[in-house]
Image (spheres, coloured by chain):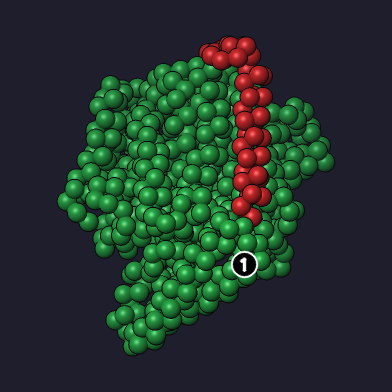
Amino acid sequence: MTNSKKTNIQTTASADDSPPILSSWKQLYYLVLIAHAIIIGIFYFFSVYYS
Amino acid sequence: MSTIDWIIMLGTLLVIVLYGVWKTRNVDSVKSYLLGDKDLPWWTIGLSVMATQASAITFLSTPGKAYDDGLGFAQFYFGLPVAMVFLCIFVLPIYYRLNIYTAYEYLEGRFDLKTRTLTAILFLVQRGLAAGITIFAPAIILSNILGWDLNLTILFIGLIVIFYTVLGGTKAVSVTQKQQMIIILSGLIVAAIIITGQLPSDISFADALNVAGKMEKLEVVNFDFDLSNRYTFWTGMLGGTFLFLSYFGTDQSQVQRYLSGKSLSESRLGLLFNGLVKVPMQFLVLFTGILVFLFFQFTKPPIHFNKANLDKVENSTYQVELEQYQSDFDAVFEKKEAEIRNLVNAINSENTAEITQSQSRISSLMRQDSVIRANVDGIIAKVDPQAKTKDSDYVFINYVMNYLPIGMVGLLLAVIFSAAMSSTASELNALATTTVVDIYKRSIAPEKSDKHYLNASKGFTILWGAIALSFALVADLFDNLIELVNIIGSLFYGVILGVFMVAFFMKKVQGNTVFVAAIITQFIVTSIYILDRMGYIEIPYLFLNLIGCVLVMIFCLFQPSKT
């Protein structure tokens, strides 16, 4: 538990760990955002189709 | 409720609680109690994060919202995946590098003790209130529908949660949430399948969707920039992103979930999993409400979904008036059902003129239906001026209790109770952690033993549980329960997020500046909300998150950074 005024910095994990799929976290982030854009696109066409 | 349903409901809840207690039987240090040994894999984190956000209100209120207003509420969650990615890039690495217990610890290192304490207190106030609502909201609906005593229902939910949260701490919360989320998702999917199967045999699923579309229930995305509309693409993407950045990045009930991850990678994957699954899951919950709406186009619904209100009228001098309204309502329903079948035929034969005319006739019948329902609300209010006449929160549970087969009723009630318990457990756990780490240990009783802080953590969990129960026992209903929780969050989240944004991205700003900026902004945000409630201005509450965050940052720009 941290009490000191300046928080004690401890490295418990590397920010550079690779994700289990794709070659970098950046690609995984793009994947999530693209998937989200596709979902919104599907919702939009769903709305238009049934309007 | 049948014996089988009782067995399934109580058995499901009991197994989950016992599993949580058994899995956390070796928790004997404050680190283990508050951070769960940091050994959770990504799927447990992801499900736990989802379960924390998905309270029972989600499963009671949201289908009713879709029943009334269609699928547009899904847009509320559009900012969530963006927020998840932002947090994975900028926030999680900092929290992991600093090895912190609470989000607010970081603010002392970055600014000073008073800023840490202020944000911790803002969190405790808003989350403490929300915890009471999280218990109260499902309790009042379930007690009305099941005929249970309201206070006993509140105590039933609250005491079970307090029991396993006190015993096992954060790990008990996470492992039970994994099981609860599995029950919740499977229960919802099975319910949606059953409702679809209960539509009339001559109405196909495609026909039903066409009908819902023509009755304007299937508009998910609305790109209009309309400030009078609470849920559009823009409120979701702008206001929603800021709300979720604050909720997932600075609300300890969520931060604690992913800080107990095995590694930074596991925590990131857990949040990204939430980003991918949350929007489709909310769509499923809303779509279940649409299916219930379609079901009630072919099966006569009650004239008012809150049976307790109807019972009051039936036992009053307004009984004859109610019977007259019921008779009118039955006649409108029969005409509407026939017209909907006519619409289906017109759609299938692609008769555009007839589709338009039929839509117009259905709209007219829907208006008559609304007028009759409003009149019934009027006599309910005359019989009991204190009664809440808005019945959308009762739509789904009414369907569950009256139309689902034996066994499924117990499962769906287990879903609702699981959701209530999972979100409440996270809240109590986070409230206790913040109280111990950011207030008690930091400013009141430093340098005590690990055992002392472990016992203090358990004690504060009981205390916050008691506060939440007390609030739940005296709380009252709002227009829509899920909105109340979100409104309370929006009042505080923007300011908290603003403080964190300044910490992350405005490196020259110091403690005094951000502290004053936060106080002023909280005052402004609260004033804006009050003015909106009084009708002087019109601001969708989701924008309060954006306003709060941006104002804190702007004030920090204009004030001298050296204080």
Tell me the chain of label 1. Answer: B
Residue drawn 24% across and 35% down?
B15
Apparent side of residue B186 relative to residue B266 in the rendered image (left or right): left
Q: Quadrant of the C terminus of chain B?
A: top right
Q: Amino acid at mark 1?
A: Glu
Q: Residue furthest left?
A: B3
Apparent side of residue B65 relative to residue B475 in the rendered image (left or right): right
| Total residue callouts | 1
Residue drawn 44% across and 20% down?
B41
Q: Quadrant of the N terminus of chain B?
A: bottom left
Residue B436: quarter of image: top left
Question: What colour do you see for chain A?
Answer: red
Residue drawn 55% across and 64% down?
B343
- Which residue occupies the foreground of this view, A28 or B408? B408
SS for tag 1? Answer: helix
Residue B140: quarter of image: bottom left
Question: Up-down: is B512 above or below B522?
Answer: above
- Which residue occupies the foreground of this view, B466 or B533? B533
| Residue B58 image offset from top left, x and y in percent | 46, 49
Apparent side of residue B52 relative to residue B523 in the rendered image (left or right): left
Q: The chain shown in green is which?
A: B
Residue located beneath label 1 in the image: B354
Q: Is residue B151 visible?
A: no
Question: Up-down: is B48 above or below B526?
Answer: above
Question: Up-down: is B493 above or below B356?
Answer: above
Q: Is residue B371 visible?
A: yes
Q: Residues within 10 Å of mark 1 (few under 14, many from 20)?
A: some
| Residue B201 image offset from top left, x and y in percent | 39, 55
Residue drawn 45% across and 56% down?
B203
| Residue B252 image offset from top left, x and y in percent | 51, 35
